[in-house]
Amino acid sequence: MSVDMLKRFELLKCISVFYSFNGLQLDENVAKLLSEVPRHKLLLETDSPDQTPKTDFSPPCCLSAMTSLTDVCNEPANIVRTCAGVSALLDESFASIANATARNSLLTFTGSPELLI
């Protein structure tokens, strides 16, 4: 996606559009695009188990599909690393990105921005 495409989507007032980023996408090239995404429309994902975030973590993976202890795997818990990458690229606090994207996820998948227990 480009900044131009994002701006075109934002002109469409008849639909709700959210923008989701995974850890593998996080680099300086995507920083400009991230800076244009309204915080109330930002989502994070892990693309688990396929696309491990770009970080220096390398935990051994215990999934039977992996063939050796040198393999690494992705898991939903790595959303924290994706959030850290987004907050670094945006020069915003981890907490602000985590709170915004948690709220947006709840809104997207439950229809409510609040956790209902």
Image (cartoon, rainbow, N blue to C red):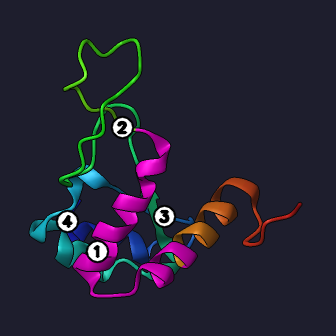
Whether pointer 1 and pointer 2 mark residues with C-beta atoms closer than 8 Å, the reply is no
Q: Give the range drawn in magenta.
A: 75-99
Which amino acid type is marked by label 4? Answer: Ser
Whether pointer 4 and pointer 1 mark residues with C-beta atoms closer than 8 Å, the reply is no
Foreground: disc 2 or disc 4: 2
Disc with the residue nearer the chain's start (4 vs 1): 4
In this picture, residue 83 sits left or right of residue 103:
left
- In this rendering, the answer to whether 33 lies above or below 69 is below
On residue 34, the disc is 1
Crowding at dot 3, Cα within 10 Å, few <14 / some 14-19 / many 20+, comes out as: some
Disc with the residue nearer the chain's start (3 vs 1): 3
Whether pointer 3 and pointer 1 mark residues with C-beta atoms closer than 8 Å, the reply is no
Q: Mark 2 points at which residue?
A: 74
Which amino acid type is marked by label 3? Answer: Phe
Alpha-carbon span between mark 3 and mark 1: 12 Å
x, y percentage for residue 55?
20, 55
Q: Which of 21 and 82 is in front in this view?
A: 82
Disc with the residue nearer the chain's start (2 vs 3): 3
Q: Mark 3 points at which residue?
A: 18
Disc with the residue nearer the chain's start (1 vs 2): 1
On residue 2, the disc is 4
Q: Which residue is drawn at 26% across and 66% down?
A: 5
x, y percentage for residue 102?
59, 67
Q: What element carries label 1?
A: helix
88 in magenta = yes
- In this rendering, the answer to whether 38 lies above or below 111 is below
Alpha-carbon span between mark 1 and mark 2: 22 Å
x, y percentage for residue 80?
43, 60
Disc with the residue nearer the chain's start (2 vs 4): 4
Foreground: disc 1 or disc 2: 2
